Image (cartoon, rainbow, N blue to C red):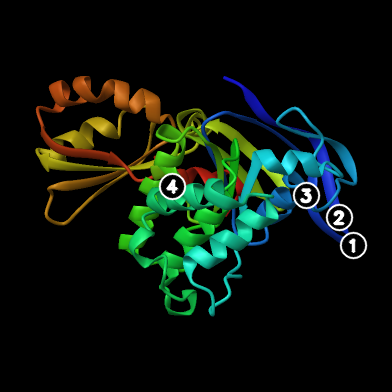
Amino acid sequence: MTIIIQAQNISKWYGKVIGLNNFSLTVESGITGIVGPNGAGKSTFFKLLTGNIKVNAGQLKVLDQQPWRNPAQLSQIGFCPDYDFLPGELDGREYLRFVGGLHGMKGPKLKGRIDEVLNVVGMTKDAERQMGGYSKGMRQRTKIAGSLLHDPRLLLLDEPLTGTDPVVRKELIDLIRDLNKVHGHDVIVSSHVLHEIERMTHMVALIYKGRAVASGNISEIRSLMSDHPHNIVIEGGGMVDLAKVLVSKPFTVSVELNPDRKRLMVKVDRPEQFFDSVPLLVEESRCQLERVESLDDDLESVFRYLVGW
């Protein structure tokens, strides 16, 4: 895979306020999610990538170049910020003509490209409407269209799903995936909603208080929890007998049986060993399993564990 971002021990501070602190991250081609709570440093990172601000310490390369004082590199980067800046008195097509002019695009080439990006983001039929009457989802699509207009190699999407309803969020997630798989753009997308990033990509970086606390494939990050107790739900028949077997196992921390005796809540400190032992547990207890699910095997739980939430 091609490395598109290389950040080595970078720090950025604003007076006494630290935006990023000794932050290191390598981003490869594809879609990468930048995940963290509000104020974690995600927007600061994007501003550094676009050359709007300069690192105070460390080394940063974007597409193998330093972004600070490198305006020519902006032709390779499309940026969709988290704030709403669209002028309500313009229609979508007028806005895109303005953006194209900023990139030096004009004439038939600009018109053709506007038609292309409107089609990509699904805004063709609403392009002549004033943006003041757009819904939140339509505004987000138009912002993304503006970031696509000059056909950049890298797209930076800062909190693109914020404020949208569940239906629009799914549509935007599908769009972001297509921007990479169908249209060939590398994408870095930030969010504070972890399960949304998980629906877009398996490559993530978790940021907390200006530091990258973990990065890589979601499955690799989950493995960091291998020694962390997992809460596991087990449902089916013969749960009393299964509970008796489980309390004797070295990986079991606790077992709680529901009053209906059809459900167990088991806490284990070696989840991999537990799941490997499931066939033997069934054979030994002669239970009938209907459901076995770890409540701590999602990205949300990993993040809470890593940062001590």
Looking at the rendered structure, which numbered label has been put on residue 16?
1
* Precedes in sequence: disc 4 or disc 1: 1
Q: From the viewer's perspective, is the residue at label 2 or at label 1 nearer?
A: 2
Q: CA distance from mark 4 to mark 1?
A: 46 Å
The residue shown at (59%, 58%) is 37
Tell me the SS state at disc 3. strand
From the image, tell me which residue sits under label 4. Answer: 116
Tell me the SS state at disc 4. helix
From the image, tell me which residue sits under label 3. Answer: 20
Q: Is residue 192 visible?
A: no
From the image, tell me which residue sits under label 2. Answer: 13
Q: CA distance from mark 1 to mark 3?
A: 12 Å
* Precedes in sequence: disc 4 or disc 3: 3
On the image, the x and y values in percent for residue 288 come to 8, 33
Q: From the viewer's perspective, is the residue at label 4 or at label 1 nearer?
A: 4
Q: Amino acid at mark 2?
A: Trp
Q: Amino acid at mark 4?
A: Glu
Instruction: Give yes or no for contact between labels 3 and 2 (Cβ–Cβ under 8 Å).
Output: no
